[in-house]
Amino acid sequence: MSRIQLLSPRLANQIAAGEVVERPASVVKELLENSLDAGATQIEIDVEQGGMKLIRLRDNGGGIEEEDLPLALSRHATSKILVLEDLEAVNSLGFRGEALASISSVSRLTLTSRRSDAPSAWQVQTEGRDMEPVVSPAAHPQGTCVEVRDLFFNTPARRKFMRTEQTEFKHLEEVVKRLALSRSDVSFQLRHNGRVIHQLRPARTEQDHERRISSVCGPAFIDQALSLDMCAEASGLRLWGWMGLPTFSRSQTDLQYFFVNGRIIRDKLVAHAVRQAYQDVLFHGRHPAFVLYLELDPRLVDVNVHPTKHEVRFREGRLVHDFIFRTLHRVIADVRPEGAVAPVARSQDGGPVLAGQTPGNPGSNAQQFEQGRMPLTQAPLGGSAAVESSPGAGFANDYRPAGPSLGAVRDQISGYGALHVPANGSGGFGAPDGNGMQGAALAAAQAQGEVAPPLGYALAHLHGIYILAQNEQGLVLVDMHAAHERIVYERMKQAYETEVVRSQPLLVPLSMAVSQNEADCAEEQSAVFQRLGFELSRMGEESLVVRQVPVSLARGNIEQLIRDVLSDMITYGQSQRIENHINELLATMACHGAVRANRQLSVPEMNGLLRDMEITERSGQCNHGRPTWTQLSLNELDKLFLRGR
């Protein structure tokens, strides 16, 4: 082995570039962050051949002093931090002072800059083995221009790992999108091979901000998103942004943007909290879409964790996880049909505006989804539940408690079979009899000046599966079984939460060998386990004994469940596994207790189901994430038949 030697500046920078500069997109990310930190409000990016041949970025930021230009291309030179206290409360996007030095070591870099009070601009380049900076005068307006040519020209091994031009540009474009979402007050222009790809103007109003979101994420997202404007603020944390409806789910996580103090991150704690909030309403294998912004004290988050700065570490991870989960969970639960149904434009005589008349365009869905409850009065429940005798399905995982018995299902949903049969024996909701059509009910309500319910009044049954209802907007189609399944499930959860969890002592206590870290966690969280129906005690440094378990999980794999719960508590600060498995059991019971296809409901029963949907949380999806209802407006129906043309 040769003697220890000091690496040359170029080789040291090239080694650092292996972490900082992965591809052209990494270069654009570092340069954009520098421009934003410099206070730029206008940024232009020119790219050729996916960034491999040329990356040119111009901004109108504060610029760099002539004397500081040589330092700008040196390692560990920055204006953003000075002492350790600055590193513990970073407010800027960049702070390490490695980017420009690393980029210049694997490309031909030219930096031109001018301060507002400087008589002229200056330019700096690095040349030779020792990367000596050469400064010369130049012509340039206020701001900075960084030109990167022939990326990886002197490191051919790295260049071989580059993908096609189109693939590299897609990665680069995604970086620009992320920064454009982070700073909607800054204008961005992206050109590729001389063609303008994005021209994003600064957002000065809420409408402009939504237009920026629509330009980056697509108009379908903003039309199917819930707004969290100023709705969540507690313990020094503030969460705002847009979250897609459960029906606007994706097959992959390509439309998920989460920002912490303006920095895009991909953190497992945040991902876990969002996934938990959506878990009860998403179809299997689908992923939510969201653009969310979390703001907190910079001292409570460590951004100096990973070279790419995509990962962070929260000082109060458990608090952040719980705050994100509860905020998103509450917003999803508060979605009601009255918020999803757009108001109808009316003519002077009070009738709805049809396709051939003056159009009335409702606002975006982000504004239509007003949270709240309908002040509807429900008739008392009556009758008996119609339950099939098929056995309860177990969990689709390793925890397999016994399926619900037929009697248990009847106890949980007794009295729901009749679905709001009126006590006076009338057909209900304006119908002359139980089998009458409800077309006149809406007209009668409008004539009396009453506001019709969001889901309207039932008209008929279709093949014993779907309910056809009429509201002011047009036609409503409801999946009878899916809707009833959600209603029963939510009522079961409420009943379970209000009751004391029943526990069952084990005939032979279960001994578990665990790590010392897991044993410490179980001892600290003993009150949480006790509230969920478990009795755990520590018998040694690495030993636990389970003496009591919930009745509903008595036949499950208790040891594996507790190990997974402890793992979650250590990683995320809390665990929802026990509640999730109890909810899975309740969902199975609700599925078997809901009205089945081909069961003919009377019109009052169908109307009772519609009224329950309007006051039930998450009624837009069944327990498995399938949609329960959809709306066809009069305009959409008119287009099908070419009316008004």
Image (cartoon, helix red, strand yellow):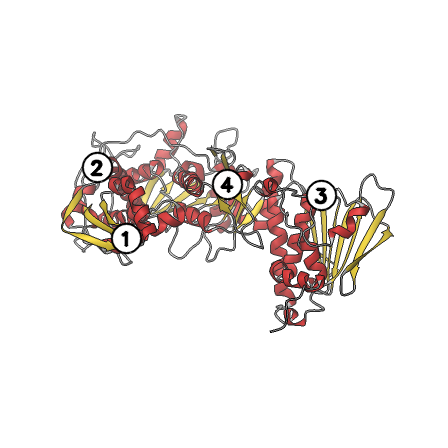
Say whether disc 2 or disc 1 marks the residue closer to the N-terminus.
2
Labels 4, 3: front one: 3
- The amino acid beneath tag 1 is Glu
**Residue occupied by mark 3:** 40
Say whether disc 2 or disc 4 marks the residue closer to the N-terminus.
4
Q: Is residue 450 above or below residue 330?
A: above
Helix, strand or loop under label 1: loop
**Residue occupied by mark 4:** 365
- The amino acid beneath tag 2 is Val
Q: Residue furthest bottom?
A: 1
Identify the image quadrant of residue 321.
Answer: top left
Say whether disc 1 or disc 3 marks the residue closer to the N-terminus.
3
In percent of width and height, residue 310 lies at 55, 52
Labels 2, 1: front one: 1
Labels 1, 4: front one: 1
**Residue occupied by mark 1:** 542
